[in-house]
Image (cartoon, rainbow, N blue to C red):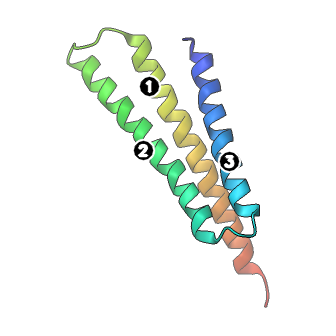
Amino acid sequence: MAVTNVTALSENAFEQAQDRFRIAAQERDEDFETVFQSALGMVDEANALGGQAKSTMIQFALGESENTHDLLIAQSKANTALQYTVAVKDKVLEAYREIMQMQV
């Protein structure tokens, strides 16, 4: 699997999570808790990918694995997931600041 395919897979996973987040936010039956749980799911996924990258790095450092390709893939997935999680966090903070500036 090429590294470009890993990036495409990570982007596809993020787009799917965004779609779930957007659908949950737009449905009238859904409440804030559902939207918040969806965002927390994205954070959990980023943490899981980070843990996988860390374990792959440890295996490589201990000499249990000599495949640098798997190490690069795991690190790329974790990095991409972290970047997307930070982007979502920034958007949430931006929305919060905008709400706080509204005059009642």
Task: Answer with the quarter of the image where residue 61 lies.
Answer: top left
- Marks 1 and 3, the one that precedes in the sequence: 3
On the rendered structure, is 72 left or right of 98?
left
Circle 1: residue type:
Ala
In percent of width and height, residue 92 lies at 64, 62
- In depth, the one of 69 and 21 nearer the eye is 21
Disc 2 secondary structure class: helix
* Residue 10: mark in rendering: none
Question: Crowding near pointer 2: few (<14 within 10 Å), some, many (20+)?
Answer: some
Q: Are marks 1 and 2 in contact (CB under 8 Å)?
A: no
**Residue at figure coordinates x 32%, y 24% from the top left:** 57
On the rendered structure, is 39 left or right of 60?
right
- In depth, the one of 83 and 28 nearer the eye is 28
Circle 3: residue type:
Gln
The residue sitting at the left extreme is 62
Of marks 2 and 3, the one in the foreground: 3
**Residue at figure coordinates x 28%, y 12% from the top left:** 65
- Write down the residue under mark 3: 18
Question: Crowding near pointer 1: few (<14 within 10 Å), some, many (20+)?
Answer: many
- Write down the residue under mark 2: 47
The residue sitting at the right extreme is 103
On the rendered structure, is 61 left or right of 14?
left
In percent of width and height, residue 38 lies at 57, 56
On the rendered structure, is 34 left or right of 91?
left
Disc 3 secondary structure class: helix
- Marks 1 and 2, the one that precedes in the sequence: 2
In percent of width and height, residue 26 lies at 76, 62
* Residue 74: mark in rendering: 1
In percent of width and height, residue 27 lies at 75, 64
Q: Are marks 1 and 3 in contact (CB under 8 Å)?
A: no
